[in-house]
Image: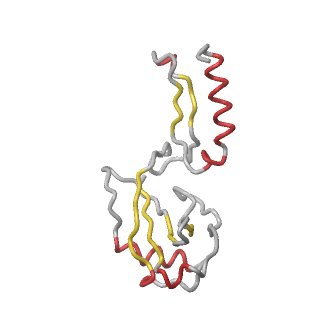
Amino acid sequence: VKGQYFRVRREKQALVNGLVYPAPEKDLLGLGIHATKDLSGSLRLGPDAGYVQAVDYSVDPSRASDFAERARALLPFLDEADLYPDTAGIRPKLQAKGGKPRDFEIRHEAPRGLPGLISLVGIESPGLTCCLAIAEHVKGLAEEAGLV
């Protein structure tokens, strides 16, 4: 799944002081377009989310109007002219296109002939929030397998 970001022009960056998230939408591939500040105080919107067949890190400038429209519900002072392409990324997604949402998977791969390998697959945004719990779980798997 590819996610794109747009940067907000400098004159409007100070109008937002923190993170701004929309309410979750049903059937959305991610959290929805939200506003985040970086350490320099710069404001960006994103990411959107769409399935892709090939890795391409370019940002489609024509998406600025959609970003502005979706962001205006939370930030009514934004116009399309306030946005310019920033960055894009590709992330894993266990949920198949049109499929039901799926959470990440953590498993020891010994049954697949790979003793000692513990896979952490499809970890998205919540992974950072629960990273300590994930680490404890992985440690438990490693101990059970005699790896620690």
| Above/below status of 113 relative to 82 | above
Residue closest to the eye, 133 or 3: 133
Along the horizontal axis of the image, is 126 left or right of 121?
A: right
Q: Position of residue 34 (x, y in %)?
A: 56, 67
Count of labels in the image: 0
Residue closest to the eye, 93 or 47: 47
| Above/below status of 26 relative to 9 | above
Task: Specify the color scheme.
Answer: secondary structure
Q: Position of residue 27 (x, y in %)?
A: 55, 58
Residue closest to the eye, 54 or 130: 130
Q: Position of residue 118 (x, y in %)?
A: 53, 26
Residue sitting at 47 percent across and 63 percent down?
48
Residue sitting at 41 percent across and 51 percent down?
90
Residue sitting at 32 percent across and 50 percent down?
53
Quadrant holding the C terminus? top right
Q: Position of residue 102 (x, y in %)?
A: 56, 43
Residue sitting at 56 percent across and 68 percent down?
37
- Please, which residue is most extreme toward the front here? 40
- Please, which residue is most extreme toward the top here? 146
| Above/below status of 113 relative to 8 | above
